[in-house]
Each structure stands twice: as structure tokens, then as C-alpha cells.
Image (cartoon, helix red, strand yellow):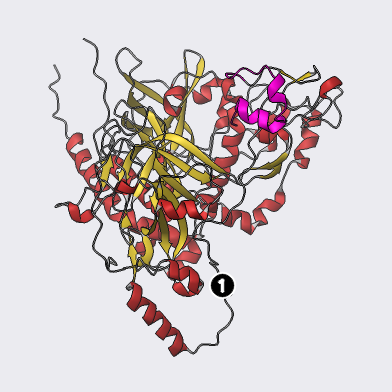
């Protein structure tokens, strides 16, 4: 009952123990994405049209790529998983979103009196592959930091709305738990911002100011771009400052094997997206059609 | 961990004790009083690993792949011969195998009648991963996917043969056995004797073999392919597999001990088990004491798992739970449960097994248990109270 359990309001500090394993996993997965294949190398081999179709998809539909851990891979399981994902996507519109996007999820729950629940918040994590894909939304409600973890393919989710489509500087935003509350407070009745078609996703370059310690993570040892480093340094002791250098791993960016193990090879990605492309494309077209119908609203007569 | 029955326990200690003992038949945790008036206690002892025995069909399987310096023509000829014999190579339900023509040479066996004491044969499967499903009430169900990998009946061993092979058996086994093979292979990989095992059934050699005890009425003709639809969604099964090999492990990982504090003056004993025995009359290490040692790589059976869903195209069973022993891509055998309350009370849909030729229309690709939500069904809603 992962989703239902987490759907209850969780006070921030309960997450302390969960945080580290989550960080580790998603960091290696998410940070590896931009390094998958440099644009220039692919351009040399591929026609520009095909390239744009297939390579963008790994960011829009990251959960279609299987877990790169070789011991857990099985091509038939992955195929069955993708089929089930497409079946669910035919029933519900799962929009394009990223960590940092402000979203609202409406889901049915037997426990609430109205049997329906809408939660709006900023996406602070997106992880998991295939049907196991989950995302975490965060908001501050009645001065209480609240996080809700949803399974992306949970059939009790009625609607996923993207309120403000944008990215942040980092692949996960757990530091918002230790940041000032205004960084994760969003009014529940926020109006959706509609981006024109084919515009690049805007990147929000906010650098958050952290609250004084204690924190849920050792943020000074990480290199999150979205934390105001200057201010953070005023909050930590001299001993902690000395230890920063000790915990850095500057060699990891040269570790080709680590990168290889954390990613799905380009050829395989193409194979996977070639398999699901036609169905995803159909769904997208249907989405656009229904959007066009929805946007036409008869003008009301003003008195 | 099985409890030792009192009678076994007495045999284990000494036959003499029997005369003087006051062991109640219900519990073996009571003290045993010896002839000398000393009392001691034997609590639990883990059963010893079964004596390694060769299986009934034991033959040398692998052969040395020395260089036979064959010409390309010769190699092609060998390939041609094996393809003539076992059919052309093909990919059937996602697995590469041979498209073997119906190998039934003899008259097909008459199908038996199901009774309550019937024991059917099981299947050899591969654990291919885990993923979530939801039930119609929106609750999360975790399932493990087991793929039935190219299973065929290799031979039937009648009960007489089993009993004559194992002379030391105390009770005569009234059950016969079916030998099931999984994953067809190139016959050149194996020895002549091993390939001969499959000659009677007209099959190419199989990578895995497994024996299932059955009642004679559940006999199946050798050469018959077995499918995932041997079971039905909602059936309860037992699964057996070899657990993940974790090597030599300490007590914290192997037995879940708490360990000792990291600081406050504790030195050199953070993950150690602590005391393993007392003094006085029991000044020894008791049998069954939890200590460091080899963990995993043991055959374990998990009983009473429900089948939530079956994929008939790839022969995949979606089985309840995440605790099925073994790594992903390891071999698991499954069979009808023996739990008395969850055992089948009515005849299964297909007996002795599923024959596709018996059906007029092919089965749909996905068969679901009634309580499971279909992924292509609309969103689960709960009605608002009035």
C-alpha cells in the first residue's frame, strides 16, 4: 500500500530515514540522463528528423526505459510492462512533467468523505522504471510540510494536471524540506499557465535559502545548484566546512563504467521507443484533438 | 525450521532414555530426565541438509567442447540433421527454441478422471521480475512474473521403478513421477546419453529437468508441451526455488541480530553475536545456535500463493508477492499447493493439463482473477455517500 500510506499527510521529519536511499538511486539515474549521448555524436549518424523524435522521448517518457541494473533485466518482462503502461495511458492523460513542475493530482480515495482528493504541489522527485514509476509532490498546507507519493500508473488517479511546466537546476529537490517555507508553498487554486506549442521547457533558476540546521541531509556535501551556497556556508560549523573536501568524489565523472552501468545504451533506447512510438504518437494526437475541443468556450454575456 | 518430533528426538539421543523419560507427546520443549537423574533440554535443531543423491535419470550431461576441426560444410550438415530431427529453429512465445512437429508416436494416453486425492504435475518457470498491479478496489498488489519456459513432458516413471531405484525407502511410494524438461537446446551441447533421455519423447535435449510426483490418473503423454494455462487465475500454488546466494554472512544479516552499540565504550564488537552458550551442565554450544555462516543458495518452498493473472501469449504467470526465492532469471518450479485448506476442492479447468487443440477459439491474451483491475479498464472510482 505504498501510495495510500504515503498519501496521508507526512510530517517532514518522518522522511529523514527514507531520504538517503532515495537520493542515491535517483541521483544516479537522473544525473546520467544528459550524458547518455551527446547531441553531436548522434547528429553524425542520424537524420535530423528521426533524431528529434526518438531522443526527446527519453526525457518526456523516462519510465519507458527499463532499470539499467543488469541483474534485474528481462526483455519479455519489460515488453509486458510497456504494454500495460500503454493500456493505462489510453485511459488517462499522463502529461509531460519534470522535477520542479507544479502539478495537481486528483485521485479517488475510499477514506475521504467526498471520496475524491486533489493535491497540488511541486514535483520534488521522479523515480522508478516501468509500472513502478512514482513521483512525489510537495506543498505546505496549514503550515505543515506535506508530501504525497503517487504511483504514476495507479488506476485510482483520475486526473494529472500540469499547472506550471518548468524544470529546476537539479534532478531532485529534497532540499526544499530544509528550505524556507515560501519555496514550497503554492496556493491550491493556482491557475494553470499554458505554454505555446514547441517552446523549450523553461528552467527556473531559483536558488533556495536554507533554514538553520538541523537538516534532513548533508546538503553542504552535495553539489545541488538550486541551493544558495553562500548563505548555506554561514549556517554550518567550521568542522563541517573542513569535511566537505574529504567527501567529494571528483573522480566519479571519469568513471566510464559507472556511467555505463547506470544508463541504457542508445541502441536499446531506440529499439524501445520504436516499439512504443506509434501508440504514444496516437495518444498524443488524441490529446491535442481533445484540447482543441476543450479550448473553445462560448463567450459569456457580461451584464 | 522444523520441530523435531518427540519420537525422533529420542532416537537421536539414545534408545535407552526412552524407558526413563517423561517426555509428553505434544511438546518437545519439556526437560528430558536421563537415567542418572540429570535433566537437559534440546530445543530446536535445524534439519540437516538432505543427503545429496543423484536424480533417477542421472546421466552425464555436459561434454567437453573440444575442437573437432570440422569444416564449414560439416558444421552445416550437422545443423541440418538436427533441424530435420527436431524442426527448424523458431521463436515461440518470446523464447528461441525448435519448432518441433508433434512428436507423439504412440497412441495418446486416455485422460484420467480427477478425484480429491489427485496430484497433478507442476511446471518449470523462470522468474522474470516483479511489478505492481491493482485490485478492483484500488489496492496495490505486488506480483512476481514467472514465465513457463518451453516445457515438455519427457517421460513418465511408474511408481514401481521409483521404489526399486530407492531400496532404502521405508514406505512404498504409491505415486509415479513425470519428468518435465524446459528450454530446448542444441543437441551438440550435451552428451549422447543425455540426449538419449529425450529420444523416446522425440524432443531435443532440454537445459533443465525436474521431477514431479503425480498420481497415475494425472499421467501425460511424453512429448506433450505444457503451457501457463495448466493453471487458472485464482489457483493457489506452491513455488520452489534456490534462494539468492549471499555467501558467508554475519549474524546481523543472516539472523537479523541487533548487533551492539557503535560507541559508548564498545570496542571491536559492533556486529558480533555476543554470547553463544552458558556454563554449568549445558556448558557447550547447543545445536541450532544462530551463528555466522553461509547464507542462501538453498532450496526453499513458499506455499499458498495466488495466481492473479496469466498471459497466454508469453506463458507468463503473475503470482502473488515479492518473496519468491531466487534471483531474477533464475529457475523456479511451481505446483498445486498442498496446504489442506487452500488445496483444490473441485476439478481443475484442464485435466491432466491444458491442450490447445481442445478449444475451438484461442484463449484471450490476458486472463485475470476476478478481483484484479485490468490496466485497460477505466479509472477506479468510489461513489460519494448520499
Rendering quarter of residue B234: top left
- Say which residue label 1 marks: B63
Q: Residue B240 location, x and y as percent?
A: 48, 43
Rendering quarter of residue A105: top left
Rendering quarter of residue B200: bottom left
Please say whether residue A222 is one of the residues in the magenta stretch.
no
Secondary structure of the residue carrying tag 1 is loop
Q: Nearer the viewer, residue A263 or B225?
A: B225
Quick check: B200 left or right of A9?
left
Q: Nearer the viewer, residue B41 or B325?
A: B41
Q: Nearer the viewer, residue A175 or B92?
A: B92
Q: Residue A95 location, x and y as percent?
A: 34, 39
The numbered mark 1 sits on a residue in which chain?
A: B
Quick check: B290 left or right of B96?
right
Q: Residue A293 location, x and y as percent?
A: 17, 38
On the question of residue A183 being in view, the answer is yes
Instruction: Give the vertical position of A183 relative to B175 (above or below).
Output: above
Q: Which residues are magenta?
A: B1-27
Instruction: Give the vertical position of B196 relative to A246 (above or below).
Output: below
Amino acid at each position: 500500500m505504498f501510495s495510500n500510506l504515503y498519501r496521508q499527510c507526512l510530517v517532514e521529519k518522518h522522511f529523514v530515514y527514507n531520504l538517503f536511499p532515495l537520493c542515491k538511486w535517483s541521483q544516479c539515474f537522473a544525473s546520467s540522463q544528459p550524458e547518455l549521448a551527446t547531441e553531436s555524436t548522434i547528429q553524425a549518424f542520424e537524420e535530423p528528423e528521426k533524431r528529434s523524435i526518438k531522443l526527446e522521448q527519453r526525457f518526456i517518457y523516462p519510465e519507458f526505459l527499463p532499470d539499467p541494473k543488469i541483474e534485474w533485466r528481462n526483455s519479455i518482462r519489460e515488453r509486458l510492462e510497456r504494454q500495460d503502461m500503454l493500456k493505462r495511458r489510453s485511459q488517462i492523460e499522463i502529461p509531460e512533467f519534470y522535477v520542479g513542475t507544479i502539478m495537481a493530482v486528483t485521485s479517488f480515495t475510499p477514506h475521504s468523505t467526498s471520496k475524491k482528493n486533489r493535491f497540488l504541489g511541486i514535483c520534488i522527485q521522479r523515480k522508478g522504471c516501468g509500472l513502478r514509476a512514482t513521483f512525489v509532490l510537495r506543498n505546505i498546507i496549514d503550515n505543515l510540510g506535506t508530501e504525497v507519493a503517487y504511483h504514476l500508473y495507479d488506476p485510482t488517479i483520475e486526473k494529472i494536471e500540469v499547472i506550471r511546466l518548468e524544470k529546476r537546476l537539479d534532478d531532485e529537490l529534497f532540499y526544499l524540506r530544509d528550505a524556507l517555507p515560501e519555496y514550497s508553498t503554492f496556493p491550491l487554486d493556482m491557475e494553470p499557465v499554458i505554454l505555446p506549442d514547441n517552446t523549450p521547457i523553461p528552467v527556473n533558476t531559483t536558488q533556495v535559502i536554507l533554514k538553520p540546521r538541523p537538516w534532513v541531509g548533508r546538503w553542504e556535501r552535495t553539489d545541488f545548484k538550486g541551493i544558495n551556497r553562500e548563505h548555506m556556508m554561514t549556517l554550518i560549523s567550521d568542522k563541517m566546512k573542513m569535511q566537505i573536501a574529504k567527501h567529494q568524489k571528483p573522480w566519479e565523472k571519469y568513471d566510464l563504467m559507472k556511467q555505463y552501468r547506470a544508463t541504457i545504451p542508445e541502441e536499446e533506447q531506440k529499439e524501445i521507443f520504436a516499439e512504443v512510438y506509434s501508440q504514444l504518437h496516437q495518444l498524443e494526437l488524441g490529446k491535442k484533438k481533445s484540447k482543441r475541443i476543450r479550448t473553445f468556450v462560448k463567450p459569456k454575456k457580461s451584464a | 525450521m522444523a520441530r523435531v518430533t518427540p519420537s525422533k528426538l529420542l532416537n537421536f539421543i539414545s534408545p535407552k532414555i526412552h524407558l526413563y523419560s517423561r517426555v509428553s507427546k505434544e511438546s518437545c520443549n519439556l526437560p528430558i530426565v536421563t537415567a542418572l537423574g540429570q535433566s537437559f533440554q534440546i530445543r530446536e535443531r535445524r534439519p540437516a541438509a538432505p543427503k545429496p543423491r543423484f536424480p533417477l535419470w542421472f546421466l552425464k550431461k555436459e561434454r567437453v567442447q573440444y575442437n573437432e576441426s570440422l569444416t564449414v560444410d560439416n558444421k552445416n550438415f550437422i545443423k541440418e540433421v538436427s533441424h530435420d530431427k527436431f524442426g527448424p529453429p523458431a521463436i515461440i512465445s518470446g523464447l528461441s527454441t525448435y519448432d518441433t512437429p508433434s512428436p507423439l508416436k504412440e497412441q495418446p494416453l486416455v485422460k484420467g478422471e480427477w478425484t480429491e486425492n489427485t496430484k497433478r504435475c507442476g511446471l518449470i518457470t523462470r522468474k522474470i521480475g516483479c511489478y505492481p498491479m491493482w485490485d478492483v478496489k484500488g489496492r496495490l498488489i505486488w506480483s512476481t512474473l514467472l514465465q513457463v519456459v518451453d516445457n515438455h513432458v519427457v517421460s513418465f516413471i511408474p511408481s514401481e521403478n521409483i521404489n526399486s531405484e530407492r531400496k532404502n525407502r521405508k514406505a512404498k511410494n504409491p505415486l509415479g513421477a513425470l519428468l518435465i524438461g524446459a528450454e530446448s537446446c542444441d543437441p551438440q551441447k550435451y552428451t549422447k546419453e543425455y540426449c538419449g533421455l529425450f529420444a523416446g519423447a522425440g524432443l531435443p535435449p532440454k537445459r533443465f529437468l525436474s521431477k514431479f510426483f503425480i498420481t497415475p490418473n494425472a499421467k501425460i503423454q511424453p512429448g506433450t508441451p505444457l503451457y501457463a494455462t495448466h493453471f487458472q487465475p485464482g489457483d493457489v500454488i506452491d513455488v520452489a526455488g534456490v534462494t539468492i546466494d549471499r555467501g558467508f554472512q554475519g549474524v546481523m544479516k543472516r539472523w537479523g541480530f541487533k548487533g551492539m552499540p557503535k560507541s559508548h565504550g564498545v570496542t571491536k564488537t559492533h556486529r558480533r553475536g555476543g554470547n553463544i552458550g552458558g556454563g554449568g551442565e549445558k556448558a557447550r554450544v547447543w545445536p541450532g545456535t544462530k551463528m555466522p555462516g553461509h547464507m542462501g543458495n538453498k532450496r526453499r518452498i513458499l506455499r499458498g500463493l495466488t495466481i492473479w493473472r496469466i498471459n497466454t501469449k508469453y506463458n507468463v504467470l503473475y503470482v502473488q508477492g515479492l518473496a519468491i526465492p531466487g534471483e531474477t532469471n533464475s529457475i523456479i518450479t511451481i505446483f498445486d499447493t498442498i496446504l489442506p485448506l487452500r488445496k483444490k476442492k473441485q476439478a481443475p479447468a484442464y485435466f491432466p493439463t491444458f491442450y490447445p487443440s481442445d478449444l475451438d477459439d484461442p484463449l484471450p491474451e490476458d486472463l485475470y482473477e476476478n478481483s484484479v483491475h485490468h490496466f485497460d479498464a477505466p479509472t477506479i472510482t468510489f461513489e460519494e455517500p448520499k
